[in-house]
Amino acid sequence: MNVALISDIHANAHALQAVLNAAKSKNVNKILCCGDYVGYYYEPKRMINLLNDWEWEGISGNHDIMLKDWLKENKRDEIYNKYGSSISIAANQLTPNEAKFIYDRPKSLKIEIDNYKVLICHGSPWDRDNYIYPDSNPELINKLFDFDLEIDLLVYGHTHYPVKWEKNNMFIINPGSVGQPRDRKPGASWVLWNTTSNEFNFFREEYDIKPVVDMCKKYDPNKKYLIDVLKRK
């Protein structure tokens, strides 16, 4: 089976479309998503519709919980001042059921695929807001390996940095971010997992960022970072 591992779409439907086009060309059967469907960018409805055309499973990220807070009228000033208009736009675009579907995803999910035990989380299995970078303290990385000795694969996101570690026949994969790369490599990042060979291939899909840039200029002209992070090398 071919499985696409993705994370941190952040309502960037143009980036997601590029990944899904590539996934289709590589005969992907299933998608696993590590959360953060919303936040930063502006097409959450199109994003969820694109995902729902596929067989997929996923968990919630910290930005998805912000959507829940926003709808409950909690932390609105804090969210807007730090991240801009994206969560407000998501709250307006999505139906109550669509929004609940996003923020009610579990914090982590353990599933079995082709006899492999897989754990999906956002920041870490114990904290969706944990940042575990490629150069993080080895003790923190080892904590991931030791969290559940029965699993074969742990997939996480949140940092927007791709990573692959292996220890004692267990793999830890961060597929990077579909919607907002932070490793100075423009494009939509994802991983193809072949369960027959147990191989992981990292991909970066090019797409036209102009429509996304135009939306940034329209909705958040003072948040220059939202544009710069898509371009920087």
Image (cartoon, rainbow, N blue to C red):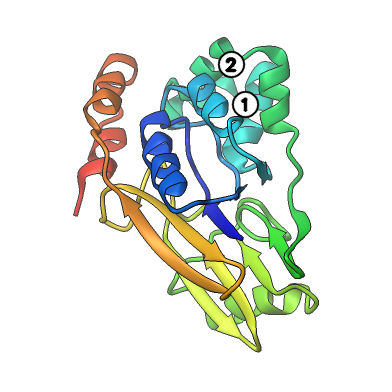
Q: Which kind of residue does numbered mark 2 sit on? A: Ala
Q: Residue at x 19, y 54 (%)?
A: 233
Q: Is residue 144 above or below residue 62?
A: below
**167 on left or right of 42:** right
Q: Secondary structure at mark 1?
A: helix
Q: Quadrant of residue 225?
A: top left
**Residue tagged by mark 2?**
91
Return the residue nearer the eye: 39 or 166.
166
Q: Quadrant of residue 16?
A: top left
Return the residue nearer the eye: 120 or 144.
120
Q: Residue at x 44, y 20 (%)?
A: 85
Q: Position of residue 184 (x, y in %)?
A: 26, 56
CB contact under 8 Å: marks 1 and 2: yes
Q: Position of residue 226 (x, y in %)?
A: 31, 34
Q: Position of residue 22 (x, y in %)?
A: 39, 47
Q: Which kind of residue does numbered mark 1 sit on? A: Leu
| Res 186 seen here | yes
Number of marks present in the image shown: 2
Q: Is residue 91 above or below residue 157?
A: above
- Judge the density around disc 1: few (<14), some (14-19), many (≥20) Cα neighbours within 10 Å: many
Q: Residue at x 47, y 30 (%)?
A: 11
Q: Secondary structure at mark 2?
A: helix
Q: Residue at x 76, y 44 (%)?
A: 106
What distance separates the C-alpha of mark 1 from that of mark 2? Answer: 7 Å
| Res 222 seen here | no
**207 on left or right of 66:** left
Image quadrant where one finds the N terminus: bottom right
**Residue tagged by mark 1?**
67
Return the residue nearer the eye: 68 or 152.
152
Q: Position of residue 190 (x, y in %)?
A: 44, 54
